[in-house]
Amino acid sequence: MRLALLRWSGRQSLISGVVTVLFALGLLLILSLQINSSYRAEVQRARDEARNLAGVLEGQLGSALREVDLVVNGLGLQLQPGDLSSPDLGEARNKTLQSLLLDQLAQIRQLDNLALFSPDAVLTHRALDTPGSNIPLKAEALDRMRNNPFIERDYARLDGKGGLQRPGLIIVHRVEITPGQLDGWVGATITTQYFDRVFGNLALGHQGVAMLVDERLGVIASYPPQPAGFEPDAATLRALRDGAQEGIQVRQTRIDGITRQTAYQQIGDTPFFVAVSLSSNDYLARWHAETRYYLIGGALLMAMALLMAYFFWQSRQLSTHLRSKEKRLDASESRFRQMIETTPVALVLSRPGDHFITYINQQASQMFALPQATALSMRVFQLYQDRLDFLNQLENVRQSQPVRNLEVRLRRSNGETFWGHLSMSLAQGSAGTTLLIGISDITEHKALESELQRRATTDGLSGLANRAHFMDVSNHELIRAQRYGRPLTLMMIDIDHFKRINDAYGHDAGDAAIRAIAALCRSTLRDADVIGRLGGEEFAALLPETPMPMALLVAERLRARIEAHELVIPSGETIRFTASIGITPLEPGDTLIDPLLKRADLALYDAKHAGRNRVCQQQSALIP
């Protein structure tokens, strides 16, 4: 009986030893797989994070450069011939240009200074005249734009030499007030102070790096200012520059014992690139801590297994394993929810099949004025102004066509519509395919675009079309009339003795007279007629589908209304004034509006010399 017991004990010990060895080997294998899997997950997360940060940085800098283009283009449209020829244009005009530059500079926070240059790159006017605000523009840097009139803008590096001047970027726009003639340049500077603000808002970690690189692979700005142990990959930047690669490119490098995940992307249609690099000392810090915990936990489990009986080992191991998995899943879900709840982008998740919303974060809930619980009973296309927009985007995503930063009209729960930048993608998970939508509200940006467009096309005093916009619209109408053989007439209106009004009652009264003429033109003419202020007291009106006899009646009616109008100025005095009108029809050989303006101006000259307050016509050369 005792021998049997010993034999049983020996067999039990052998089985226990074998099971213990197998358990130890299995535990070591599981730990190694878990550590390797978590390592790969952290590396992939770092690559995705670098890619996302590069996309965010490209969007911010691209948007900033586009805003600069809009402001500078708007500035160019408000300049007059000769404004860039000399720094001494008289005290009044110099003050006007200084005010104009300061107004444009105040519209966009990333600009440090704004200046005007003559065709020879001589500084004539600038918004700020403070130490360190100089724009060192050199004539030879403009040769490429000077020799190629189709290049409207170019960039130059601001090297920051001279002590007070910060390094950065110079943006130069070509100015052609007179078509086909170089009138000068508009220069704007963005220093590293703005780039430092943008880079400083990125979650780069302690050893992360963000850079702005030009097409010559020179570093314009970086954060931190002098990063140690990092150089951008020249081959990747050259491939992006030459078009051999597109989109965001992520590269892994190892220098001085540090592995880096670096994302590169070109900024829109500019010659600049962003590079965002994350250090393994940052993105693997959590992995190192978790690995230590895994090893300590494995050692404890092995020690417990050696002290426990064989018959309780399987149940104990299974229970421990299940609890460990549950904790990791809960922690992972908690981290995921915390990440998407705190992200500054509105996120919406839905099922691609029936389009029901499965989740929205707090930002999306606030953006659409929609409680999160209520959103779960809605379909995602109900957030769109037009359901077809959603269906078209979903079809593109299903065909592997990316939808990124697309401008879309969306709708809040109260019916209010707004503009948003929308990105859409399909993600595969354990629960199946999920449609992921990211949205940024750009309503203010669209309002700014609309305001800049209005300022670029509208005369500030009269509210009518300015000269450039009038010429552009009139040329389109002229082409249409010539193509279909339709009649068209142009009239020019000039206030009689306008200088007397200014001299007798002041310039405010003159401005009031101009506004009164604009109001009378709008109320007398049709909505289809194009009315513009050409400058000073001179106006023009283009009358499509209007033959000469009818145009003469309209012009006479307008002249009579101006003569009968009484203008009451703030002093209580009543001013009455008249206007002379010159009118001319469209000729078959007219291809631009300029010949009509010349003929109408001659007719206006005849009206002035015939005694004013009358309508004179300049007959077509084809009419006997």
Image (cartoon, rainbow, N blue to C red):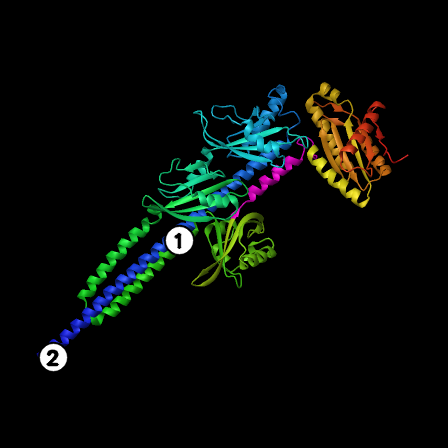
What is the x, y in percent for residue 506?
69, 21
In the image, 569 versus 329, the foreground residue is 329
The residue type indicated by label 1 comes to Gln
Q: Which mark is residue 4?
A: 2
Q: How many marks?
A: 2
Return the disc, 2 or 1, that comes first in the chain's sequence: 2
Q: Quadrant of the N terminus?
A: bottom left
Residue with the mark numbered 1: 44
* Secondary structure under the numbered disc 1 in the rendered image: helix
Quick check: marks 2 and 1 in contact, CB under 8 Å?
no
Q: Nearer the viewer, residue 335 or 257?
A: 257
What stretch of residues is rendered in magenta? 440-465
Mark whose residue sits in front, 2 or 1 = 1
Residue 38, by quadrant, is bottom left
The quadrant of the rendering that contains the C terminus is top right
- Residue 139: image location, x then y, percent: 56, 27
Q: Is residue 329 above or below residue 48?
A: below
- Answer left or right for 158 relative to 30: right
> Which is more toward the observer, 522 or 156?
156
Among the 4 quarters of the image, the one containing residue 10: bottom left
Look at the image and say whether residue 464 sits in the magenta stretch: yes
Q: Residue at x 84, y 31 (%)?
A: 618
Quadrant in which residue 520 is drawn: top right
Amino acid on which disc 2 is placed: Ala
- Picture residue at 46% right of the left edge, 45% below the top: 236
Residue drawn at x 67%, y 32% is: 180
x and y, in percent, of residue 46 in the image? 39, 50
* Neighbours of disc 2 within 10 Å: few (<14), some (14-19), many (20+): few
Mark 2 element type: helix
Q: Is residue 309 visible?
A: no
Can residue 97 be seen in this snapshot? Answer: yes
